[in-house]
Amino acid sequence: MKKQILAASLLAASSTAFAGSHASCGDVVIGEMNWASGEFLARLDGFIMDEGYKCNVEYLTAGTMPQITSMNEKGTPDIASELWANAAANAIDAAVAEKRLVKLNPAPITGAGEGWMVSAAAAKAHPELKTIDDIIARPDLFPHPEDPSKGGFHNCPSGWGCQLVSANLFRAFDMEAKGWKLIDTGSGAGLDGSIAKASERGENWLGYYWAPTTLAGKYNLKLIDFNSGFDQEHWDNCIVKPVEECDNPQRSSWTKSEVVSLAQVDFAERAPAVAEYVKARTFDAELLNKYLTYMADNQASGEEAAEEFMLNEEATWSKWVSEEAAANIRKAL
């Protein structure tokens, strides 16, 4: 099955006969996010579109902001399977209003959420840390790995929308003046590694993360109460912007998370059967975590986890697809 989901380089070399067999759907570029659930969901969509609907699938791998920018300005990818939309709500809403982009599935993952979290060890050892203000007052409990005299906050990797948000909230809470420094985790793997390392050692950890995810569940990460109000206009026009475009960030709670499957309108119109599949494809947190755990335990790729899902969850995926697509998929399996 692995070879059935083809990389872009192989697709470019596909034969004319192969391309013709996919004519009913045509070429599809799927935005593959650079974290586990985003990789898994993109590869799952790719397999179903390829085998079930005879699409000619390619992938564009990047973080949230590059994906949104490319969809909005370049018209590619055709679909982003798991997009955390809060980072660019204004741009997305404008594109939807102009009928260039469409939220094919407004809730592909149930129970999703994000924000600043602390490790279970920190929450257990220091029950007095009830709000962000309590935590900020104790930088000594979360020593920066390169400067233990300062507290360390683990920020998101470059290209993730949460990097901008966390950097602005760091300023809004005046954390530098209160003895804190940001930690550049470098990549999704680096962020995950910092959580796993601290949790396995029973150490305190503070940073950004989201759920449902394998690590949030496995290590029982605790969301922090930001002890602040929420102003949507300030969030959209300052907090989610690059630091140089947010001159005076104010305290804020994290916005309610919106996770969507976002697509180009022209793609939804030329491939209506695929669009119907995407609209029907929704994961609950427990089922998603099962395959994220599979990825973590087996050091498996999103493609391998997608294969495992297709082999074992026919009762689920068969409800998402047309009868013809289901028959095609069974033949491929």
Image (cartoon, rainbow, N blue to C red):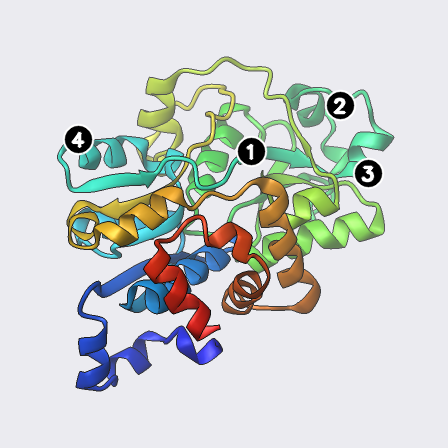
Q: Earlier in the sequence, mark 3 or mark 2?
A: 3
Q: Position of residue 272 (x, y in %)?
A: 22, 50
Q: Earlier in the sequence, mark 2 or mark 4?
A: 4
Q: Earlier in the sequence, mark 3 or mark 1?
A: 1
Q: Dividing the picture into quarters, in which one does residue 211 lie?
A: top right
Q: Are marks 2 and 4 in contact (CB under 8 Å)?
A: no
Residue at image location 22% in from the left, 56% down from the top: 76
Count neighbours of disc 2 (C-alpha within 10 A) and say few if under 14, some if 14 to 19, many if 20 or more.
Answer: some
Residue at image location 67% in from the left, 43% down from the top: 216
The residue to which callout 2 is attached is: 129
Task: Specify the label residue 111 is tagged with.
Answer: 1
SS class of the residue under badge 2? Answer: loop
Amino acid type for the residue under numbered disc 2: Leu
Q: Earlier in the sequence, mark 4 or mark 1?
A: 4
Q: Position of residue 219 (x, y in %)?
A: 75, 45
Task: Specify the label residue 121 is tagged with.
Answer: 3
Q: Dividing the picture into quarters, in which one does residue 164 lie?
A: top left
Count neighbours of disc 4 (C-alpha within 10 A) and say few if under 14, some if 14 to 19, many if 20 or more.
Answer: few
Query: From what the image shows, is residue 223 above or below residue 201?
Result: above
Residue found at the far right of this picture: 125
Nearer to us: label 2 or label 4: 4
Residue at image location 52% in from the left, 46% down from the top: 156
Distance from label 3 to label 4 (Cα)? 46 Å
Distance from label 4 to label 1 (Cα)? 27 Å
SS class of the residue under badge 1? Answer: loop
SS class of the residue under badge 3? Answer: helix
Nearer to us: label 3 or label 2: 3
Q: Position of residue 201 (x, y in %)?
A: 83, 51
Q: Earlier in the sequence, mark 1 or mark 2?
A: 1
Amino acid type for the residue under numbered disc 4: Ala
The residue to which callout 4 is attached is: 97
In-image side of 27 versus 211 (left or right):
left
